[in-house]
Amino acid sequence: MCGITACVGNDDVLETLVTGLTNLEYRGYDSSGIAVRSGDGISVLKREGGIENLEAVIERERPSGTVGIGHTRWSTHGAPTDANAHPHTDCTGRVAVVHNGIIENYADLRTELSADGHTFTSQTDTEVVPHLVEDGLNAGLTPEEALRSTLDRIDGSYAIVMVTADSDAVYATRNGSPLVLGLDDDRTFVASDVPSFLDFTSRVVFLEDGDVVRVDADGYAVTDADGQAVTRNPETVDWLPEDAERDGYAHYMLKEIHEQPDALARAMNGRITSSGGVSLDRFPPGSLGDVTDVQFVACGTSYHAALYARQLLADRGVPGQVFTAGEYATSPPPVRDGTLVVGVTQSGETADTLQSLRNAKENGARTLAVTNVVGSTAARECDDALFIRAGPEIGVAATKTFSSQVTTLTLLIERLVEDVTGSPSEGRAELLRAMERLPNDVQQVLDQSSIGSLATKYRDAEGHFFIGRGVSYPVALEGALKFKEITYEHAEGFSAAELKHGPLALVTPDTPVFAVFCGRHDEKTLSNVEEVQARGAPVVGVASEEATHVVEAVDEFVPIPDTHPDVTGVLANVQLQLVSYHVADLLGRAIDKPRNLAKSVTVE
């Protein structure tokens, strides 16, 4: 979840490290720090709080060197303090380490090292690493050998990047937490995520679990867990530096909401044929013909996209189930011949989802990653991968990736249904035409939305409820999640049918209810609207601009372009994203950096 950056070159790396940290602050913003190696040893600077606190110290100290590492933290072990910030050092100050993940046996190692005379200054699990490396160096090992001996003693998930006072190289390794190299003409980068160095290069090398890499001014060398040299071929990512900038918007989240028309166009580009069919490069006709049932595994927003996809499958008569990846990872359901397990993960690095996919594969299931990141762990480890093409998403609260996931999954389902049943789904041509209109329809929502006035009206409510049926149900869940993530106010999403089975007890005149209508079963949702109105709650209806039956029944009406019922959820979700954004903005929340949250959850 935290952000790692590192650089080795022939020139001073200080400003480059700060740029990398700033680009990665969405991965963690409790504290940050750098370690720069110079001829006098290693200079370590770190501070609690945002990167601006660290920058103030850097401006005074101005350490210089051609080798450096940096870290921006999302706390797991130990509160966000100066002492707990990374990098962490050994007793002598000649080893500095940054780390993502969790070292599960750190308590035993800390006790053992303390008994041997090592002194600890933080509460973190990470601090055992530089002390273990210190023991290796004292025993006469090289830095790489000392790192390998350390890996033999630690358990858990990690991405570790290290500098030592006696070497002009950076050493790095990963196990269950992402690391990527960036290749420039005169310098090499190591980072937890591509945006760290996107200002400088788009040539990347994705490292794999067990890899150990040595990076110096001449380049890099990768060896596997057994110390054997391996080749990891460079790739070029199609992200541009401006994709990871705010570009004049007040927040990344608002920019990414407005990027959805382009993201949706990319998601569909080349995948809908002129003859009204679906063309997916990795899934030619018949490639999914042996699928008997589908299990989706995902977390958070991706889980809601998976729920949306399962509803589409159910409507087409294909068995499908959705599991939260955290539960699937520890209590996997049975799989059989023909089971397809689809992991939906924006980053491709979500720990629970990865473990779920590994369990499924070990049990004989076919696995498929639906992800945004080419080269991610999920994309490499699964049997197949399908990319949503959303581009980098910096805001912690997912927006354009949800829309792109739903769109990509819809196309996958159309391919799957045709393969399994032998014929296209009923009404597919109409659905695909509606999907091709989606970018323009979303743009219409963005251009015409008046949600700001609605946000002003309901920002101080004591609770906010979101309801829907069919594909509108996962949209209601996603609307509530976005609202609570960035406003910090109470919000809950329900199936409209479940209101009377308990949640109705929470409804009062001070709890606005956002009702999402998809054009199917609207009459039943309207009966639920009457139930909450009878308790005095105001109802905001989100529905097609032509849904006069909804307009007449609700207290506030939020229109979306009239379209196919299966894609209404994408349009309704954009309006709900705007509700959350504007309420959070009115309340003065840290929209791009909501408290206690980080973008990628790479620990279980």
Image: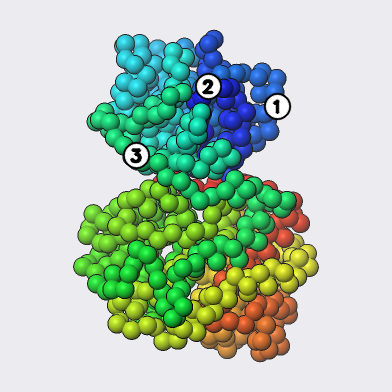
Q: Can you identify the residue that label 2 sits on?
A: 10
Query: Percent from the top left, x then y, of residue 126?
Result: 44, 29
Q: Residues within 10 Å of mark 3 (few under 14, many from 20)?
A: some
Query: Percent from the top left, x then y, of residue 252?
Result: 65, 51
Q: Secondary structure at mark 1?
A: helix
Upstream in sequence: badge 1 or badge 3: 1
Q: Can you identify the residue that label 3 sits on?
A: 232
- The amino acid on which the numbered mark 3 sits, given as a three-letter code, is Arg
Upstream in sequence: badge 3 or badge 2: 2
Query: Percent from the top left, x then y, of residue 438?
Result: 58, 73
Marks 1 and 3, how far apart at CA: 38 Å
Q: Is 229 left, or right, of 42 in this rendering?
A: left
Query: Percent from the top left, x then y, of residue 147?
Result: 35, 24
Say whether marks 1 and 3 touch (CB < 8 Å): no
Q: Can you identify the residue that label 1 sits on?
A: 56
Say whether marks 1 and 2 touch (CB < 8 Å): no
